Image (cartoon, helix red, strand yellow):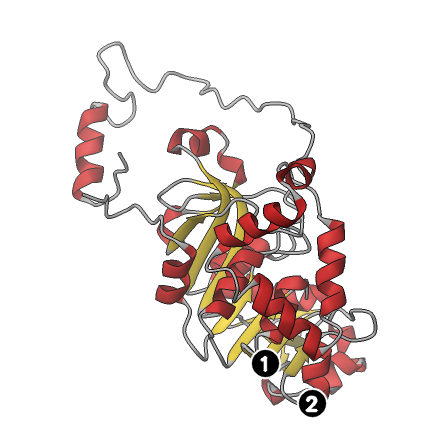
Amino acid sequence: MVNSNNKVMSLKEAVSENVKDGDELVIGNYSLSMCVALASEVIRQKRQHLTVYTQSSHIDLEYLAAGECIDKIITNFITVVAGTGAVVRRMQREEIEVEEYSNFQYNAMFQAGMYGYSFMPVLEGAIHTDLFKKRTFMGENKFKVIECPYTGKDILTVPAANPDVCIIHVQRADKFGNAQYWGAMGSVQAAALASKKIIVSCEEIVDHDIILSSPHHTIIPAYRTNAVVETKYGAHPTEVVGYYNRDSFFANWAFGCLTSDKAIERWLDEWIYGCKDHNAYIQKYTELFGSEILNSLKCKPFYSTPVNYGCPTPRWDDNGVHTTLGIKSEDIEKIMEKEGLFHE
């Protein structure tokens, strides 16, 4: 019988269960480890009318725009691909609306959402910029100026962001959904924890003991995760710190195809719709270019110094009784199991 706390599933299952038409969806990653495999599955399932938050405006956003999944975007910049791209073309045809913030303001929205606040103060100098003056679908709710209850001065605020679902790619996770990530952080953790549902794809699913051995890398705890998908090369052609480098040739080829509707249509047919899942995508890649090309992207090891998590005083006496709680470990496990908190 499958453990009820086991959240491992396929990409198809994860997207089918957690991403719906009309959702607010945040691409959790920032500049690295883009969740390309998850975005591709959203396209395969033909999700539509999404409002997408993204701090990177990377290839996954371009794919989603080309797949006609997006109606609205909230971001801090739009990547211009060789003068144009799927996002820009759809903006020019008024098929996508974009609301723009600064990096700081974008982060503040998710910080507010993560902490359960309804808004967050930001630097008031933005009042004098077009970021404040130019508004699209958010209208007066893009920014609000309020009076500080302490000083009486005007404070510029942004609304909290609480998307319906976050898609995010990380280095590793356990089957329960404890997700570990290292690299460019940006709004990565806040974007995930501010969301109502979280889909985690990862390079590898590891034993829970590995998660426990480096708790400082855990950015999403198990109780917040809705789905975990082991997806090797799930960020390809972008890079994942400690696993593989950017596939510049393939990325440039993809971006080149994004410059025209006909080219991107052929690209989607071949690399997304033409592949039933991510494994088929990787298989197609290796058949065309050889597995040695994929293997050549792997990172050379560069390890940090281990951290000592040793306890300064013993927690258990010679009889196996906890020195503070006064009970044995098996009693603690029984309590946790009763409360649904125990992971085997």
Q: Which residue is most to the top?
A: 318
Q: Please tell me which of labels 2 and 1 falls first in the chain.
A: 1
Residue indicated by mark 1: 72
Amino acid of disc 2 = Arg
Can you see residue 226? yes
Locate the N terminus by quadrant: top left
Name which residue lies at 66% across and 81% down: 98
**Residue 229 in picture, x, y percent from top left:** 43, 50
Question: x, y (%) of residue 31?
Answer: 69, 55
Q: Is residue 230 left or right of residue 146?
A: left
Quarter where residue 83 is shown: bottom right
Query: Can residue 148 be seen here?
Result: no
Locate residue 168, reporting x and y percent: 52, 55
Q: Establish if 95 lies above or below 47.
A: below
Front position in the image: 3 or 317: 3
* Coordinates of residue 13 in the picture (x, y in percent): 36, 59
Location of residue 263 (image quadrant): bottom right
Crowding at label 1, few (<14), some or many (≥20) Cα neighbours within 10 Å? many
Residue found 78% across the figure and 82% down from its top: 130
Label 2 to label 1: alpha-carbon separation: 13 Å
* Camera-nearest residue between 36 and 19: 36
Residue drawn at (68%, 34%) of the image: 299
Q: Is residue 127 above or below residue 211?
A: below
Depth order, front residue of 24/95:
95
- Judged left or right of residue 121, residue 168 is left
Q: Which residue is mark 2?
A: 93
Q: Residue furthest front?
A: 287
Pointer 2 with pointer 1, Cβ within 8 A: no
**What amino acid type should be assigned to the residue bearing mark 1?**
Lys
Mark 2 element type? loop
